[in-house]
Image (cartoon, helix red, strand yellow):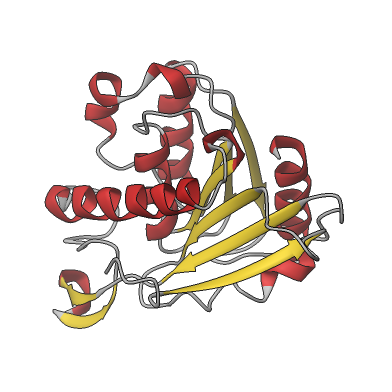
Amino acid sequence: MNESSQMVEVEVGNTAGKSSDAAVIWMHGLGADGHDFEPIVPALNLPSRLAVRFVFPHAPVRPVTINNGMSMRAWYDIFSLGGGVEDEAGLRATQQHIEALIAKERARGIAADRIVLAGFSQGGAVALMTALRHTERLAGVMALSTYLPLAGKLAAERQLVNADLPVFMAHGKADEIISIDRAASSRDALLALGYPVEWASYAMGHAVCPQEVADIGAWLDRVL
């Protein structure tokens, strides 16, 4: 899972003749792969002054309980929809994988506070989990159509260096996979711990819409 070939990379902005000076590590949702959000990058309309590397890793293929044990790309197992017992072992293994991706960007010369973790659905859950526990200050975390995993353990495990980390959460008002109420509860849990959460909701289901893409681009411009 940590092989460099297991990811898609896209560079945008003023990168001609020089390396990127910021990175967005963006995790896909259940059953998709790293190519899923690759086409969204040009639609973000980031200013040319930003030199950003987008890293889209592929989750490993594993059996997923809610899909009758069918094997597919997944960051962790899901035992039931809507909450309940979580795959803590799978979540923590993926956290370590994302930490390794951060370390790779640091080794390439990207400062920690120029790195954003992002993700959709399952990918957003592991982005939140990892960013809030990371030991160096990051630039921000973007959580799309998702929820806060292992929420009851965050207060004890979070890193104070990221206690005021910018958080962007976006959700569909008609999300049929992860209810907006569940996402809002996660938002409220983060707010209660003092995180500056920027929240947006849209008239859509478990998806991404053009206005959301525009809002993502504006938020990335602000934090980077």
Residue situated in front as seen by the camera: 222 or 144: 222
Q: In this figure, what is the number of numbered marks?
A: 0
Q: Is residue 45 visible?
A: yes
Position of 79 relative to 224 (above/below):
below
Which residue is at 68% across, 66% downward? 11
Q: Can I make out residue 85 in this image?
A: no
Find residue 71 and report its horizontal and vertical position in percent.
20, 82
- Where does residue 55 sit, x and y in percent of width and height? 53, 63
User: What x and y, as percent, mark residue 12?
Assistant: 74, 64
User: In screen coordinates, is 107 left or right of 130?
Assistant: right
- Give the vertical position of 150 relative to 71 (above or below): above
Residue furthest out toward the front = 17
- Closer to the camera in the image, 49 or 140: 49
Q: Residue furthest right?
A: 48
Q: Residue at x 69, y 36 (%)?
A: 223
Residue 130: quadrant of the picture: top left
Quadrant of the drawing holding the C terminus: top right
Identify which residue is drawn at 20% across, 47% down.
92
Q: Is residue 174 above or below residue 111?
A: below
Q: Is residue 187 left or right of residue 92?
A: right
Residue 106, percent from left and from top: 48, 45
Q: Is residue 46 left or right of residue 61?
A: right
- Where on the picture, by quarter, is residue 169? top right
Q: Quadrant of the N terminus?
A: bottom left
Above-or-below relation of 34 to 120 = below
Residue 20 in which image quadrant: bottom right
